[in-house]
Structure formats: structure tokens, C-alpha cells
Image (cartoon, rainbow, N blue to C red):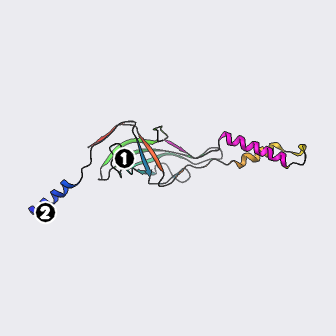
Amino acid sequence: MSIRSAAILLSVALAAPALAAINVAKGTVVAVTLNTPVSSKTSKVGDKVQGTIEAAQASFPAGTVFQGELTNVVPKTDTAPGMVEAKITTAHLPDGTEIPVRAVPCNDKGDITTVGKGKAPSEKKKTQAAKLGAVAAILVATSPEEANIKAGAEAGLKRVGKPRDFEAEVGKKGWIYFQDDVKAK
């Protein structure tokens, strides 16, 4: 290699911005955007999950990709919503550096929510639906004796909906909580 080529490579290397040291305290919360879809209906234990930070946060540069895996997946049943659990194990920095991490999903306040659950009707909605069904049974009956209030209440409950699977599409915003300090240079 010529001296001129070496000088050019050295000047390019010196001009490239160096990434700052990573120093993240346990309990830090970072916002991420999901890169992989997650579903209690179709995902399996061990499936990889990724999220990216769009702007620099907690000393991680913008574009850092956090990767982990699903640790538990349970599809919905007739009585319970579907749910998934995940753990985050690696931070992939934009320069190619990989840093081991121990993190889990959380809400924006840092409350750990390792379990993502589908929706189930609330007790309040169930009660309202049963009452509306009973009232409807009374209204359509030709006489009070013919009103089948119990059947009306059951019909109302059926209309309130069944539990659903947990679904998180690519682009969904979320947060991760660091369970340990992270230090890297």
C-alpha cells in the first residue's frame, strides 16, 4: 500500500464518528418500534423479535436494533385472551457491535409487562350486555309471562364478544426495561 493510500484511509478513519461508550443503568426504559410481527395465534416459542430505536436514547445511538425471543405463546381460548412473553438479549449497534443485554417489554412508565395479552370483555361490558339482552327480551315479548329474561341476558352476553388473540404489527411502538446495567465501549 502506498503512503498516499495509507494517509487517505487514516483520514477517513479519523473523520468517521466514533460511537460513545454505552452506559445504561438498570431500570432504564427505552422506546422502540417493532420490526417483527408478534401474534399469540401464529407465533411460536423461540421466534425472534426485534425493535429499533429511532432516535438516540440512554446512550444507545439511533438505529440500534434490540433482539430477543418469545419465551411463551398461548393462543386465545373460549374463555381467556391469547398472550405472549418475550425477553430481549442483544443490542445491535449501527456500527455492527453486538452488546448482550437483559431487558423485557414494559409500558412507557417502566411497569414490566412481559406478558402481552389479547382483549377480553370487561365485567362491566358483560353486565351491560346482559342487562340490554334482558330488556330486549321484555320489549319483544307480547306479555310479561312470555318474556324470557334469562335467554335475553345470555344472548346479550354472546354479543359482547369473545376473547381475542394478542396481535402486534410491525411499526407498533413499545418500550423495553433494562433489568441489568449495560456497559460497553
The answer to whether residue 145 is magenta is no
| Residue type at numbered disc 1 | Thr
Residue 42 falls in which quadrant of the image? bottom right
Magenta stretch, residue numbers: 114-139
- Distance from Cα at disc 2 to Cα at disc 1: 36 Å
Does residue 183 appear to the left or right of 7 in the view shown? Answer: right
Residue designated by label 2 = 5
Secondary element at tag 2? helix
- Residue 58 in picture, x, y percent from top left: 35, 42
* Left-right relation of 43 to 79: left
Which quadrant holds the C terminus? top left
Q: Amino acid at mark 2?
A: Ser
Q: What is the secondary structure assignment of the residue under circle 1?
A: strand
The residue sitting at 44% across, 48% down in the picture is: 69
Left or right of 139? Residue 26 is: left
Residue at the image point whose x is 89% and y is 43% from the top = 144
Q: What number is the disc on residue 6?
A: none
Main secondary-structure element of the magenta-colored stretch: helix
- Return the residue at label 1: 90
Give the residue drawn at x 84%, y 47%.
139
Mark nearer the N terminus (2 vs 1)? 2
**Residue 1 seen in this snapshot:** no
What is the quadrant of the N terminus in the image? bottom left
